[in-house]
């Protein structure tokens, strides 16, 4: 079995700052991490590898050269191989253009049985790239995967909805996007770290994957971020005094009347 996992290197959101003049993210000096939902996707692929001998797990990402570090982390966790799509021609891609490039990269990798991805990236929160890849590869897709079971060449999936859960069964190959409740990602192992240090990460350009230059990059992106900003801090709250709920309600009403709210 061959499993491809789509991953992304993202800024550590606890360290993010906004340039007050331009409204853009300040990325200089900001640590980068493996996107959390993608870590769950990778873990599920590795669990399948643990239970199905002979399974190969390949991580793929699109990004700048430093994204190699994140792919080495994937290798250290247990992935067998990794591919970085990196080219100035791909820079500035929105979700539509990104999925064009990643889908082309997956086609170049070749035969596969499953594609896993995280539900969404914490730096964009669009949850669009995984489903778009599925559409462009002509594959069935299931999003928000909370539970997963593989048997008889089919996947039984429990997906989270706003008001409950939905259980579906899908034939392979397919695309599945994971949420954090699916599993707990493993740590990098010492043998894995040693392997990752020696492993050569494949780096493919736009020409290598044969993607149409008119379908990737900033100029090919129909959407763009108009502005990013930090919400203004909320004012301090006020505790309503009272020993019982009735007293608190009375004091709250009195405070409202004092401020002429009621």
Image (spheres, rainbow, N blue to C red):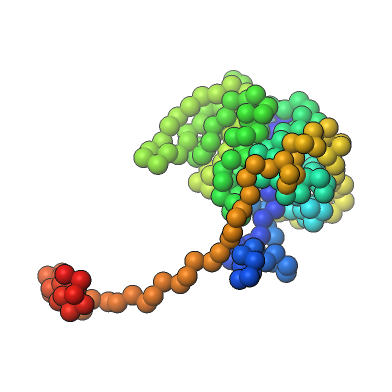
* Residue under the image location 59 percent in, 40 percent down: 128
Q: Quadrant of the C terminus?
A: bottom left
Q: Quadrant of the N terminus?
A: top right
- Residue 41 quadrant: top right
| The one of 136 and 53 positioned closer to us in this rendering | 136
* Residue under the image location 65 percent in, 33 percent down: 133
Instruction: State whether residue 54 appears in this view.
Output: no
Compared to 13, does 224 lie above or below? above
- Residue 95 quadrant: top right
* Residue under the image location 16 percent in, 75 percent down: 257
Q: Position of residue 205 (x, y in %)?
A: 85, 42
- Residue 153 quadrant: top right
* Residue under the image location 82 percent in, 34 percent down: 209
| The one of 116 and 96 positioned closer to us in this rendering | 96
Q: Position of residue 238 (x, y in %)?
A: 29, 77
Tag count in the figure?
A: 0
Compared to 13, does 147 lie above or below? above
Compared to 197, does 93 lie above or below? above
Q: Using residue 111 as the reference point, say whether residue 26 is left or right of it.
A: left
Q: Using residue 49 as the reference point, say whether residue 90 is left or right of it.
A: right
| The one of 161 and 74 positioned closer to us in this rendering | 161
């Amino acid at each position: 079995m061959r499993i491809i996992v789509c991953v992304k290197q993202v800024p550590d959101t606890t360290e993010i700052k906004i340039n007050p003049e331009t409204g853009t993210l300040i990325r200089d000096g900001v640590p980068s991490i493996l996107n959390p939902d993608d870590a769950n996707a990778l873990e599920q692929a590795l669990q399948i590898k643990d239970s199905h001998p002979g399974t190969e797990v390949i991580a793929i990402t699109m990004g700048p050269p430093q994204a190699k570090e994140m792919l080495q982390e994937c290798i250290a966790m247990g992935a067998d191989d990794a591919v970085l799509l990196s080219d100035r021609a791909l820079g500035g891609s929105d979700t539509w253009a990104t999925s064009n490039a990643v889908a082309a990269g997956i086609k170049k990798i070749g035969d596969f049985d499953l594609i896993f991805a995280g539900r969404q990236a914490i730096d964009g929160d669009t949850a669009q790239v995984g489903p778009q890849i599925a559409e462009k590869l002509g594959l069935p897709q299931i999003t928000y995967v909370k539970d997963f079971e593989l048997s008889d060449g089919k996947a039984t999936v429990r997906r989270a909805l706003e008001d409950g859960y939905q259980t579906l069964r899908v034939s392979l190959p397919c695309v599945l996007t994971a949420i954090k409740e699916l599993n707990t990602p493993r740590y990098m192992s010492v043998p894995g770290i040693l392997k990752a240090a020696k492993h050569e990460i494949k780096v493919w350009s736009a020409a290598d994957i044969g993607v149409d230059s008119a379908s990737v990059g900033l100029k090919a992106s129909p959407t763009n971020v108009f502005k990013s900003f930090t919400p203004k801090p909320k004012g301090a709250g006020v505790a309503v005094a009272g020993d019982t709920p009735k007293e608190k309600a009375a004091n709250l009403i009195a405070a409202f009347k004092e401020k002429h709210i009621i």
